[in-house]
Image (tube, rainbow, N blue to C red):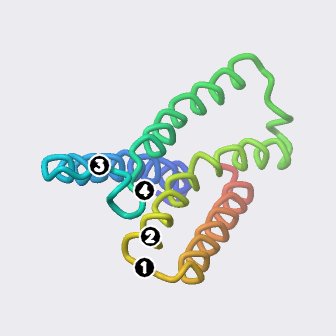
Amino acid sequence: MAEDQFKNTLGALVLFVAFSWLILTVAVDFGAEYGRDANEIGEGSLDIASFQSSADAVEGNASGYRERFESGKVDDIDDASGIFSIATDMISMITTPFKLLSQIMVNVFHIPSLIINVFLGLLAIGLILGIWRLLRAGS
């Protein structure tokens, strides 16, 4: 079970992007029924287009990773640096929705950006440790 921890974490975060987009879509649609658009709600931080492009990028990035594996254009996969480069390429796919959510938390809920930055820092540290575990375990 612990062998697939990075894969499970990555899958869960991708599903989190989809769930966030769904919740945001519902919120903006409710606002539209009451005559409000996304720019009026939360000082424009509820922009569905940002989440949509983030969700669309997941499929594009995953296809790019698959094509790299199929074409053999992967860095030396037997070397730790090769696995690390692939895993670090996935980090932008993971962190984008959290950056978008941080904008919502600051603009809508007025949470201080310092607290949001601490949580984003913890996420980055967790991802680095997850990649390190992936390198160490080799699965």
| Residue receiving disc 3 | 37
Disc 3: CA contacts within 10 A as few (<14), some (14-19) or many (>=20): some
What amino acid does circle 2 point to? Answer: Asn
What amino acid does circle 4 point to? Answer: Gly
Badge 2 element? helix
Badge 4 element? helix
Badge 1 element? loop
Task: List x then y, in percent, for residue 48.
Answer: 39, 45
Name which of mark 3 and mark 2 comes first in the sequence. Answer: 3
| Residue at figure coordinates x 34%, y 50% from the top left | 38
| Residue receiving disc 1 | 110
Instruction: Pick the residue in front: 7 or 40.
Output: 40
Mark 1 and mark 2: Cα distance apart in space: 5 Å
Left or right: 81 in relation to 27: right
Task: List x then y, in percent, for residue 54.
Answer: 51, 42
Name which of mark 4 and mark 2 comes first in the sequence. Answer: 4
Disc 2: CA contacts within 10 A as few (<14), some (14-19) or many (>=20): some
Mark 4 and mark 3: Cα distance apart in space: 9 Å
Task: List x then y, in percent, for residue 137.
Answer: 68, 57
Task: List x then y, in percent, for residue 16.
Answer: 39, 53
| Residue receiving disc 2 | 107
Mark 3 and mark 2: Cα distance apart in space: 15 Å
| Residue at figure coordinates x 45%, y 81% from the top left | 111
Mark 4 and mark 1: Cα distance apart in space: 14 Å
Name which of mark 4 and mark 1 comes first in the sequence. Answer: 4
Instruction: Pick the residue in front: 52 or 71.
Output: 52
| Residue receiving disc 4 | 44
